Image (tube, rainbow, N blue to C red):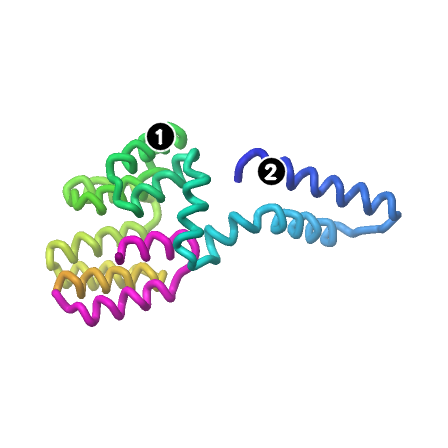
Amino acid sequence: MNVKRLIAIIFGGLLIGFLLGVLNVQVDYWMFVFLVFIAFLLFSYRDVRYMFLSRDVEKIEKYLQKKSVEPYYDFILQLANKDMSEAKKALEKLEEKWKKKERTAVFRANYYLYMKDWKLLKEEITFIPQEEFKHYFLAAIAIEEKNESNFVHSIQHIRKDWMKLSLEAEKAKKEKNKVLADQKQLEALRATKGIQYYILSKSFD
């Protein structure tokens, strides 16, 4: 959330408090929390919609383009469109902004995955703090290496349906089973919304 949006939410909360004071309305603590939450939703709806709820690829892309001054959104936009040169620039800006290696490990891993740089991907996995993401990338490597036992082991540690289904789609594609690959891709898209839907949809094109 940018500073302007945060200021707007704070101002909205203060305005609600002022109006309640003028109207001499008594509000308990939980009612106040609820009102602030409503103010947050009203001012943040556009972000919430495109980040988590929408399946409109064109509108999500326009949203990302408007937000691309921030390296996080720019990286997603460039990676999804497979502009690896610009994605690398955005990644470098993100690393400079976030500093800690663990915070950007998943982004670097995704970059190496798109580049099919399996050596660097394997090295990067050690820095990823989230076990589920580690196994996602390990499963992707297992698909590339045609290691069925490693694939089965890793996918058992993945809870998110879109992750499992997208990996199964990639595996079917690698095995030249187009019918199964298309089916798994469709199921993966049905299992997600927002930014992740956008990324998957672009990667499946």
Residue under label 2 = 6
Query: Amino acid under label 1?
Result: Lys
Q: Regarding mark 2 in the picture, which secondary structure is present there?
A: helix
Q: Which of 70 and 134 is in front in this view?
A: 70
At label 2, the amino acid type is Leu
Position of residue 190 in the picture relative to residue 179 (left or right): right
Instruction: Please tell me which of labels 1 and 2 falls first in the chain.
Output: 2
Which residues fall within the magenta stretch? 176-205
Q: Is residue 204 magenta?
A: yes
Q: Give the position of the C terminus as an image quadrant.
A: bottom left
Q: Is residue 166 left or right of residue 146?
A: right
Q: Can you tell which quarter of the image residue 57 is in?
A: bottom left
Does the magenta stretch mainly form a helix, a strand or a loop? Answer: helix
Q: Which residue is painted at 35% across and 63% down in the image?
A: 189
Q: Could you say where residue 33 lies in the image, as x and y percent from the top left?
A: 69, 50
Choose between 125 and 43: the one closer to the eye: 43
How dense is the environment of label 2, judged by Cα within 10 Å: few (below 14), some, or many (20 and up)? some
Q: What residue sits right under mark 1 in the picture? A: 93
Kindly identify the residue that appears in the image at 60 percent across and 38 percent down: 6
Label 1, secondary structure: give it.
helix
- Is 91 covered by the magenta stretch? no
- Counting labels gives 2
Q: Image check: 78 left or right of 192?
A: left
